[in-house]
Image (cartoon, rainbow, N blue to C red):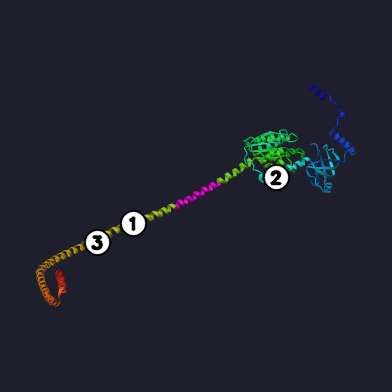
Amino acid sequence: MADSQGSRSEHPPVTEEGVWSVEELNTEIESVVAAAQDRLPSYVIGEISDVNRYGFGTFFDLRDLNDDITIACIMWAPQRDAVSQELTEGTETIVRATVDFYEDDGRTQLSVRTFWPVGESDRTADLAALRSTLESKGLLDDAATRPLPEFPRHIGVVTSLVGSARADFCEAVRARHRGVSITVCDATVQGDGAPASLVAGIQRLEREPAIDVVVVTRGGGADADLWCFNAEPVVRAIADCTTPTVVAVGHEDDDTLAEAVADRRAMTPTDAGVAVSPDMSAVLSDLTRVERRIDRAYDDRITDGLTAMAQRLDAGLETLEHREQARETTRRRVTDLEHRITVAYESLVTTRLTGISTRIDRAERTVVHAAETDAVTARAARGRLRGIEPRIDVAYRTRVDRELNTVDDRINEAYREIETIARVEAGRSEARRLKIVVVVLLAILGAVLLALATGVL
């Protein structure tokens, strides 16, 4: 193989006269295409994708209905504006066009004059059904999105190691935050094997507890290359991811379902790097400004606090001095009052004791005088009593004798009266009356004796 290559380098397969320049080749291709226009078809059917509308015209790709083969198309503004329909992504369409070859860049494309949509392709119908299912489950609602971590420590990336997406993403992250860790999981990002590869990468990063955010990204490309990001396994893997997700597939005009269910959509890998990493220089700058503001506020607060404290201390000291002066004045007043109270108390006690002594002396003299008077009176009373007693005895005996004589007289008189009555009455009635009279006389005698004994008579 090496000898063959060496001989090939020493002996070119053609002579110098037979080597064409790029210009010559492109000119020849252009002439061949121009000469073969009558053999090329005027109508081509395919699926519209990657539509880019501009003022002068619209660029889009026409994808084969059975494969991912595409051809670039352009429809200039006059022809586009003359058609009532819109060029819609995913629409199966018949275009009337001519094949143009551009000699300057060796590019072939269809120059479309008009087109007729003939229906949606199976892939577009599947996409619409999946979108409807996701909407019914609320996975496309803005409320379902989660905030990205403000300061992630570990970022996981699902992308191809071959393209520039990985380098662009890592460069954007490192430029903003050098301390963050990045784990890149290699995956196929287009073609038939892309969905399974993307799902495996997403699930692998999802199982890593250290991963704070998962980024799924690739560089730009045609719509046909991005269909793997509409595949249901990929979309559901992103929707089921418990770690916050970012999808950046480098396509501005239309969202893929992977972007729709992600927590954040970014345009390019660089934009994704910016979205998931904080700008530490700005953070440090903000911290510096905050530190300065804190220092100034602290200094101002300390200065104001010290000033206020000094004023409060001065005011407190002045208040204490006033209170001390007031306390001293009060103490002097209390001392003076105590002296006055002591003098007044001693004077009052002396006066009261003198008065009490005088009253006691006076009372004592009064008591002695009264005692002496009572003694004299008692002696006189006892003398009078001794003189009265014989008189009472004489008067009593005299009174009793007189009363007894009177009673005796009355009894005699009554007796005589009874004798008189007894003579008048006869029989037992006379005796009964005598008994009654005797009883009455005895009662009277008892009453008289009782009266005499009690001093009534």
Farthest-out residue, front: 427
Mark 2 or 3 closer to N-term?
Answer: 2
User: Where are the magenta residues, as a range?
Assistant: 296-315
- Residue 425 % position (x, y): 15, 76
- Residue 357 % position (x, y): 21, 61
Farthest-out residue, top: 3
Q: Secondary structure at mark 1?
A: helix
In the image, which disc is placed on residue 334? Answer: 1
Residue type pointed to by label 1: Val
Residue type pointed to by label 2: Ser
In the image, which disc is placed on residue 136? Answer: 2
In the image, which disc is placed on residue 352? Answer: 3
Above or below: residue 22 compared with residue 423: above
Q: Is residue 440 visible?
A: no
| Quarter in which the N terminus is drawn | top right
User: For the residues carrying marks 3 and 1, which lies nearer the camera in this image?
Assistant: 3
Q: Residue at x 55, y 47 (%)?
A: 297
Q: Which image quarter: residue 125?
A: top right
Mark 1 or 2 closer to N-term?
Answer: 2
Q: Please tell me how crowded label 2 is: few (under 14), some (14-19), or many (20+) other residues with Cα within 10 Å.
A: few
400 or 287: nearer the viewer: 400
- Residue 108 % position (x, y): 83, 38
Mark 3 or 1 closer to N-term?
Answer: 1
Q: Which image quarter: residue 431?
A: bottom left
Residue type pointed to by label 3: Arg
Q: Is residue 207 left or right of residue 338?
A: right
Q: Secondary structure at mark 3?
A: helix
Q: Is residue 127 visible?
A: yes
